[in-house]
Each structure stands twice: as structure tokens, then as C-alpha cells.
Amino acid sequence: MSMIKINHKNNNIELVSKLMNSVAVKYDCRVKYHPETETVSFHGNDACKPFIAEETMNLFNTI
């Protein structure tokens, strides 16, 4: 039996940005992942960033 080559691509940044965006909506903000540059941009009140980050990290702690 021959082996099948599997190419793995790490999409962790994309996943985290989607989770962050879900939380950011609560603060009337937005987090967007740009796959072509593999970067994340934030749109909204900078004062909300720590709250969004903390709530996103809490999602991982409850798993």
C-alpha cells in the first residue's frame, strides 16, 4: 500500500480571529483575518481590546 501525502496548514490564527470576532461583536468592534497576508486587523475602540482578549481566552479555559 502506498502512502498518501498530507499537507497540513496551520490555521490557528484564522480560528482564533474568528473566535475573537465573535466576542468583539459584543463590544461593537470587529476582528478580521486576512489570509493573503496571514495578518489580523482590529476595528473598534482600543479600550475594548483587553476585554475581548480575556473573554476569548476564557473560551479555551472552559473546554
Image: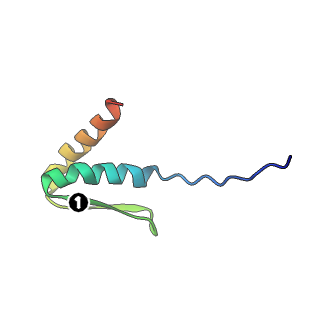
Percent from the top left, x then y, of residue 3? 80, 48
In the rendered image, the quadrant that contains the C terminus is top left
Percent from the top left, x then y, of residue 61? 33, 30
Mark 1: give few (<14), some (14-19) or many (20+) Cα within 10 Å: some
User: Which type of secondary structure does the marked residue at label 1 adopt?
Assistant: strand
Q: Which residue is mark 1?
A: 30
Residue sitting at 73 percent across and 53 percent down? 5
Residue sitting at 28 percent across and 42 percent down? 56
As drawn, the residue found furthest toward the top would be 62
**Residue type, numbered disc 1:** Arg
As drawn, the residue found furthest toward the right would be 1
As drawn, the residue found furthest toward the front would be 1
Residue 12, placed above or below residue 59: below
* Left or right of 50, for residue 13: right
Residue sitting at 46 percent across and 69 percent down? 36
Percent from the top left, x then y, of residue 54? 24, 39
Residue 39, quarter of picture:
bottom left
Percent from the top left, x then y, of residue 8? 61, 52
